[in-house]
Image (cartoon, rainbow, N blue to C red):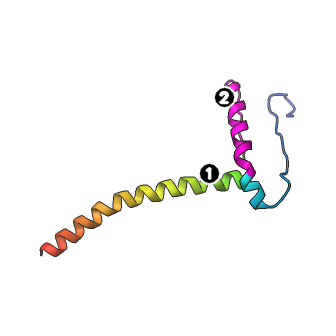
Amino acid sequence: MSADGRTALLEWDMNGTEKTAESNVDALTRQTDAVARAHRDFYVGQAGVVSSKKALNKEFSSQLGKAGMRSLPLTLLILAVVSAR
């Protein structure tokens, strides 16, 4: 608890291997989100190696898919222009 009593930090370590943590972190994330929804006047968040890694991988995969959807039409257009010459 902070000196002014307005901030609290809860630290913990998950037992097991990183692979075990990867399979269990989703339940923890859902619970954290539920607490955040129930207490909208407060910031409730979660940060850790495994949860951050999963979030980054999800965002990277999403962006990679979008890049593929954008590059395919452009590639076909370039091929059509080049082959027309």
Count of all numbered marks drawn on residues in the image: 2
Query: Where in the figure is residue 5, as x and y percent of width and height?
Result: 85, 28
Mark 1 surroundings: few (<14), some (14-19) or many (≥20) residues within 10 A: few
Q: Give the range drawn in magenta.
A: 24-46
Question: Is residue 37 one of those drawn in magenta?
Answer: yes
In the rendered view, tell whether residue 39 sits above or below residue 56. above
Looking at the image, is mark 1 or mark 2 earlier in the sequence? 2
Question: Which residue is rendered at x = 72% and y = 43% of the image?
Answer: 27
Query: Where in the figure is residue 37, as x and y percent of width and height?
Result: 66, 28
Question: Which residue is rendered at x = 59% and y = 57% of the image?
Answer: 57
Position of 9 with respect to 58 (left or right) is: right
Query: For mark 2, what is the residue?
Result: 37
Q: Quadrant of residue 17?
A: bottom right
Question: Which residue is rendered at x = 72% and y = 54% of the image?
Answer: 23
Question: Is residue 60 one of those drawn in magenta?
Answer: no
**Which mark identifies residue 55?**
1
Query: Where in the figure is residue 39, as x and y percent of width and height?
Result: 71, 25
Q: Where the C terminus falls, by quadrant?
A: bottom left
Decide if residue 49 is in sight here: no
Position of 41 with respect to 65 (left or right) is: right
Secondary structure beneath dot 1 equals helix
Task: Please state which amino acid type lies under the numbered disc 2.
Answer: Arg
